[in-house]
Amino acid sequence: MVINCENLGMKSKNTHQSLSRRDFLKSSGAFGALTILPSYIALGNQSTSGLAPSEKVRLAIIGIGNQGNRDRKLLLASGLCDVVALCDIDMNAAHTHEARYVHRITGKPPVTKDGEMPPGQSQIQARAYTDFRKMFDDMAGDIDAVLIATPDHSHFAATMLAMSLGKHVFVEKPLAHTFGQCERLMDLAARSGVVTQMGNQGHSGPNYFQFKAWSEAGIIKDITRITAHMNIKRRWHGWGATASSYPSEPILGSIHWEQWHDVVAANRTFSSKLHPQEWRSWYEFGSGCLGDWAPHILDTCHRFLQLGLPERIVTLDRGGINPYDLIYPESSTIRFDFPERGPNLPACKVTWYDGLNNEPTLAAEYTEDSDYELLNNPGKELYSEELAFKGGHHGQPLQIVPRSKFLDMRASLPPFPQKNSNHYTNFLLACKGEEISRSPFSVSGTLTQVMTLGMLAQRFGGQIEFDRQNKCITNNPTAHTLLDPAPRKGWESYYKL
């Protein structure tokens, strides 16, 4: 079946449906309070916020447990920010305890012997919230930037609201849960002018600077094939293929479960198989292994090879499939076909492998000894007519294989910067106008859209034909609808900012 993209397709990010400030105020109340948007932003005007070099960034954190807490400590360790607000749907949980109570300073704050706060501390006592809308109602004028480290399905609304208020945003990967959400985030980021960063931390590591320098020097060129893989056991392995429904357990403690659902339309009962960490297993709330790890493995390939969006996604293999359409397969092999992008950017096939014992092998002509036959795991391999490269994940640099080829080229390989700000410092310096963020939504948004298309291939199998110009799936009506599913009632306004 051929789908009429004009009737069912995504809106272009240049044809967004605008929502007036008055209409938004009517529809976005939180607990009876209205989110008051400042007049200078007017839902789309460029951000006018600025910080003096001596000022610290006033940071709010939405999602303070687990990864959010790790991000919090690394942002504070830069010495460039103070945490002024904390928000989580369960402020009394064991996994949110450290982030919340490290800020409850009584008497004199702890200091090092030279009079400075130790890393990971804040001189500000942060105010606590369970609803980000109420936090912005109360504190919009006291916040410069926001870290959003909630589950995948709940990145979108908080990020949209923050940007509409002129706040800089650091959002954990994957940027959002659906193709359409990414489209809207890129659009509003461009209109608002705020600093944006996705949390694929390796995009500020050695591989970023190496890939950039080697591409510019013509070392990495004419790449026609890439393999990427993550073959470590995932949370749903062992039970995901047999789950027949969402489980149900009594809600413990003070969890705000309705708030946890955020924009997702379905109303699921509480379960430890969803919260606090198992949500990644489920199609409805998470992004599986691909959405979790591909932003750490394929980010530089996607950026510097200018891959953009694929024209076809082919499911080569799936194992441990959930027959009830609930949970990601236990293994999958997915191929993305990217067309030629210019005279020096030939068509490229990127094949993703996940699951135990489901990995590619290094092409025989590039192996020389046992050290170079082994792949990095998780990792990637890039092939051109003349060279092959083997790499790992996050910021791990590439190796030229086989080793004899690397030794022949070593003296002529271009250098790349070795001392650079990390991903967190880069974001905060960008907020202060001193650097440019390395993984802004204009870059990370399209990368995430590729992942969302791959997630649909994992779910439906077969082949997905994608119209890159009109941004629609042309051969699978159900998959096409899931590019941009309708939000939960009461959350529609965030899709119109």
Image (cartoon, rainbow, N blue to C red):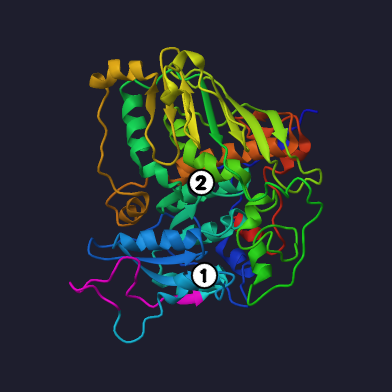
Q: Is residue 290 left or right of residue 126?
A: right
Rate crowding at label 1 as few (under 14), some (14 to 19) or many (20 or more) other CA atoms within 10 Å.
many
What x and y, as percent, mark residue 106? 36, 85
Residue 343, located in which quarter of the rendered image? top left
Q: Residue furthest front?
A: 370
Q: Could you tell me which quadrant the C terminus lies in?
A: bottom right
Q: Is residue 44 magenta?
A: no
- Is residue 497 shown to the viewer in this render? no
Query: Magenta segment: does it hold 114?
Result: yes
In the orientation shown, which residue stands out farthest toward the left? 114
Tell me the amino acid under the disc marked 2. Met
Residue designated by label 1 = 96
Give how far across and how far down residue 223 sits, in percent.
46, 20
Q: Which residue is mark 2?
A: 186
Q: What's drawn in magenta, residue-wise?
A: 110-128
Q: Position of residue 204 (x, y in %)?
A: 36, 44
Quarter in which the N terminus is drawn: top right
Residue 475 sits above or below residue 92 on the image:
above
